[in-house]
Image (cartoon, rainbow, N blue to C red):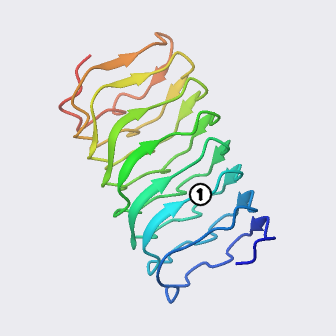
Amino acid sequence: MPNSLTAIDFNAFDNCSGLIGNLTIPKSVTSIGKQAFRNCSGLTGNLTIPNGVTSIDDEAFYDCSGFNGTLTIPNSVTSIGMGAFENCKELTGNLIIPNKLTTIEAYTFEWCRKLTGNLVIPGTVTEIGSEAFFGCKNLTGNLTIPNSITTISPLAFHECSGLNGKLTIDNPDAEIAEDAFSECPGLKR
């Protein structure tokens, strides 16, 4: 990709299963469009979103199951669309949520089962969508839901069985779906 590229548009590489190896996104890119790399299962290694990217649209990396290194999302990202990293089941490393993000959309990290470490949700996030972290079983430690959160949708943390510490919900008025933390036996309130 040329270094002058500023956007990777809708469906740019959708279903390009023949793309193999590492993906290098130029530092000039500021947005990654809807389904840009969906089903590019031949891509491997780390997935590093360059600093300067502000938006990652719906299903941008959906089912890129070949990525087997770390996922790095810079703080420049202000929006991540629904299912953006869904089923990237071999991505590893600590999951760090950008501190400018306001919504964690439905299915964003669903089945990213090898992402590890403590999950820190920044105080800028107001909503966590349905199944956002469904099946992220290697996230560990305590989970603090900041005061900014007003809504946690159904199955948001379903099967996050590695979360094994204290669950703290700072906003007593937050709407939390009954099954938001189902199959998380290690979390204690």
Q: Is residue 180 above or below residue 19?
A: above
Q: Can you say which quadrant of the picture contains the C terminus?
A: top left
Q: Quadrant of the N terminus?
A: bottom right
The residue closer to the viewer here, 140 or 104, is 140
Q: Residue at x 37, y 55 (%)?
A: 112
Q: Amino acid at mark 1?
A: Ile
The residue at which mark 1 appears reads as 49
Q: From the top left corner, tell me how far across and down residue 149 is, in percent.
A: 54, 23
Residue in the image at 59% along x and 27% along y: 126
Is 5 or 139 nearer to us in this picture?
Answer: 5
In this rendering, the answer to whether 14 lies above or below 123 is: below
Residue at the bottom extreme, as displayed: 18
Disc 1 crowd, CA 10 A, few/some/many (<14, 14-19, 20+): many
Asked which secondary structure carries label 1, the reply is loop
> Left of 160 or right of it: where is 34?
right
Horizontal side of 1 relative to 177 (left or right) equals right
Residue at point 59% right, 71% down? 24
Q: How many marks?
A: 1
Residue 92 lies, with reference to residue 129, above or below; the image says below
Residue at the spot 21% in from the left edge and 30% down from the top edge: 164
Q: Is residue 144 above or below residue 17?
A: above
Residue 54 lies, in percent from the top left, at 71, 49
Percent position (x, y) of residue 16?
56, 84
Q: Seen in the image, is 85 located left or right of residue 126?
A: left
Residue nearest the observer in this picture, 140 or 172 = 140
Residue that extends furthest to the top in the rendered view of this protein: 172
Image coordinates for residue 121, horizontal then vertical, percent: 48, 30
Q: Is residue 177 left or right of residue 52?
A: left
